[in-house]
Image (cartoon, rainbow, N blue to C red):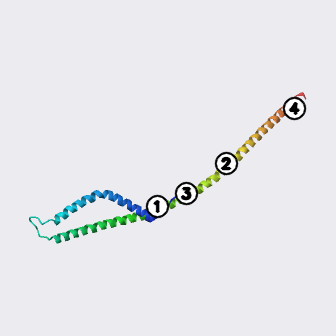
Amino acid sequence: PRFAMVAPSTMRAGALAALLAIGGALGMEQHASRQRTLEAEWSRDLQAPQAQPKAYKSPVQRVRKLLQKMKAELDAEADKESEMYDKMVCWCETNEKEKKKAISDADAKDKELTAEIEARSARFGNLAAEIENTKKEVKANTEALKTATTIRETEADKFREEEKDMVQAIANL
């Protein structure tokens, strides 16, 4: 066939890599900004309590709170990535089906057009032969018409001569 089929797993992997590259390039700046914000927040949480503490938290409690916050953020990121992966898989499957249908439609159209070309080529051959025969017939008919015209003119001349002779003979009588 004209179209090379790409393995679905290769197509999915390529699409996923492309999206991750795009997301990575766009998200590098966001990631760096987010990391600075988190580091500032963590260092603030891990520092000794301020002059007016609301409630004293031991370093272990602060680290525990920080780890819980990190876990919540990681879970949220995992959910977002899972959702993005599901969308990517859906897109790949949908796109694959559309491409397969487009390829099968194109193959069917190709066969249809090939058959039409062959039919028209055959018809062209027949019409060319008919044109040639018609030209021969026209030529033959033209020659026959010239011959018939010559014969008619000759016979008309003879008739006029005979008529003239007859009219002369009648006038003599």
Name which residue lies at 19% across and 69% down: 63
Name the quarter where the C terminus is drawn: top right
Residue 166, disc: 4
**Residue named by callout 3:** 110
Q: Which of marks 1 and 4 is in front?
A: 1
Q: Is residue 64 left or right of residue 151?
A: left
Q: Which of marks 4 and 3 is in front?
A: 3
Dot 3 crowding, Cα within 10 Å, few <14, some 14–19, many 20+: few
Point out the tag, 3 or 1, that comes first from the N-terminus: 1
Kind of residue sitting beneath label 2: Ala
Q: Is mark 4 on a helix, strand or loop?
A: helix
Point out the tag, 1 or 4, that comes first from the N-terminus: 1
Q: Distance between the residues labelled 1 and 4?
A: 96 Å
Rendered position, 128 above or below 85: above
Q: What element carries label 1?
A: helix
**Residue named by callout 1:** 99
Report x, y in % for residue 153. 80, 35
Report x, y in % for residue 134. 70, 46
Report x, y in % for residue 52. 9, 65
Q: Which of marks 2 and 1 is in front?
A: 1
Q: Is residue 92 left or right of residue 76?
A: right
Kind of residue sitting beneath label 1: Lys
Q: Distance between the residues labelled 2 and 1?
A: 42 Å
The reply to whether dot 2 and dot 1 touch (C-beta < 8 Å) is: no
**Residue named by callout 2:** 128
Q: Nearer the viewer, mark 2 or mark 4?
A: 2
Residue extending farthest right: 173
Dot 4 crowding, Cα within 10 Å, few <14, some 14–19, many 20+: few
